[in-house]
């Protein structure tokens, strides 16, 4: 039979804004290629790619130009003092993405339908994930695979509400969820203009909680992925490349971007 439309007729599909911090390293272009191959298949996705750098790099600029999807290319360097093991990553880059999003929508008339999602460049995203997050009303959540020292972490749901967290790591976190485990509606981002990621006082693994507690409560969260019983995103991490045999002399005769 005929499938009823999910959206009221005439209403456009809400845009999904994906904020991706990225930094220069041997695997960067490979990661961005995998990500673009996924994002290209998602309708109405706007990619906000934020380089951790003092200037836009040629590699990423060329990549964006050829990526074949709507993309905003920003950059902001992480201050040197914050580039240390044990400190949260990509704080400044996610905030730059948030600032761009707020500025862009400041002058547009409401209602502005959109969904924001923080998409690290090394994770693995199923296409179904985007269908799920597209219907976010305020803040939605779902399981994340291969994270927290377990096969997955997930919000525990009872009667359609989040009542706790299945996690093996720092269960005391107010929102025991990875960056890849939630989405926020544009309305919520615009109505909480001061909500940002903070450097001061932020501990490892607390970035998500520190951000989410500025904009929502656990009771208000909307469980996705069949009441948080399906893994649609994986916190994959790429191993460091072995460049032990890179030549110091007798370099290749051509200069190839990798
Ligand atoms: C975990 C979480 O999944 C991240 O969301 C969180 O930012 C991170 O911990 C943290 O410790 O802050 P993890 O896999 O350890 O993730 O972190 P990465 O994937 O190495 O970095 C997260 C994002 O920041 C990536 O998109 C990466 O490209 C970017 N990044 C990383 C930078 O922009 N600059 C850096 O110096 C490092
Ligand atoms: Mn990662």
Image (spheres, helix red, strand yellow):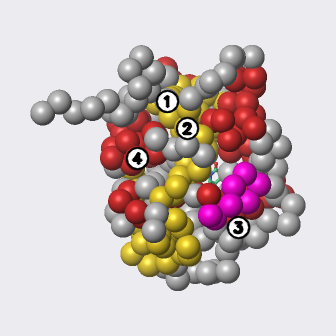
The residue shown at (40%, 63%) is: 227
Mark pair 4, 2: CA separation? 11 Å
**Range of the magenta residues?**
213-219
Indicate left or right for 35 with 3 as reference. Answer: right
| Mark 3 element type | loop
Name which quarter of the figure residue 37 lies in.
top left
Which residue is disc 2 drawn over? Answer: 115
- Which of labels 3 and 4 is toward the front? 4
Residue contact between numbered discs 1 and 2, judged by CB atoms under 8 Å: yes
Mark pair 4, 1: CA separation? 12 Å
- Which of labels 3 and 2 is toward the front? 2
The residue shown at (45%, 21%) is: 11
The residue lying toward the viewer, choosing from 30 and 124, is 124
Which residue is disc 3 drawn over? Answer: 206
Viewport quadrant of the N terminus: top left
Question: Would you say residue 12 sits in the magenta stretch?
Answer: no
Name which quarter of the figure residue 53 lies in.
top right
Label 1, residues with CA under 10 Å away: few <14, some 14-19, many ≥20: some
First reached walking from the N terminus: tag 4 or tag 2 = 2
Which residue is disc 1 drawn over? Answer: 14
Which residue is disc 4 drawn over? Answer: 132
First reached walking from the N terminus: tag 1 or tag 3 = 1
The residue shown at (49%, 29%) is: 14
Indicate left or right for 205 with 63 as reference. Answer: right
First reached walking from the N terminus: tag 3 or tag 2 = 2
First reached walking from the N terminus: tag 4 or tag 1 = 1
Residue 111 position (above or below residue 86): above
């Amino acid at each position: 039979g005929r499938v009823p439309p999910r959206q009221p007729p005439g209403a456009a599909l809400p845009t999904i804004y994906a904020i991706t911090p990225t930094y220069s390293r041997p695997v960067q272009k490979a990661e961005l290629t995998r990500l673009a191959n996924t994002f290209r298949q998602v309708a109405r996705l706007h990619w906000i790619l934020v380089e951790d750098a003092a200037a836009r790099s040629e590699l990423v600029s060329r990549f964006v130009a050829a990526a074949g999807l709507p993309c905003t290319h920003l950059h902001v360097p992480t201050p040197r003092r914050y580039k240390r093991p044990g400190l949260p990553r990509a704080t400044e880059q996610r905030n730059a993405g948030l600032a761009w999003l707020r500025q862009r929508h400041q002058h547009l008339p409401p209602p502005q339908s959109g969904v924001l999602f923080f998409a690290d460049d090394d994770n693995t995203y199923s296409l179904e994930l985007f269908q799920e997050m597209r219907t976010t009303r305020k803040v939605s959540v779902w399981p994340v695979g291969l994270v927290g020292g377990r096969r997955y972490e997930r919000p525990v749901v009872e009667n359609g509400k989040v009542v706790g967290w299945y996690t093996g790591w720092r269960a005391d976190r107010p929102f025991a969820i990875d960056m890849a485990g939630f989405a926020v509606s544009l309305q919520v981002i615009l109505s909480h203009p001061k909500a940002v990621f903070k450097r001061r006082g932020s501990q490892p693994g607390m970035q998500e909680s520190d951000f989410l507690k500025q904009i929502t409560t656990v009771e208000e969260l909307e469980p996705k992925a069949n009441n948080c019983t399906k893994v649609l995103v994986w916190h994959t991490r790429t191993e460091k490349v072995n460049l032990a045999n890179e030549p110091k002399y007798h370099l290749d005769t051509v200069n190839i971007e990798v």
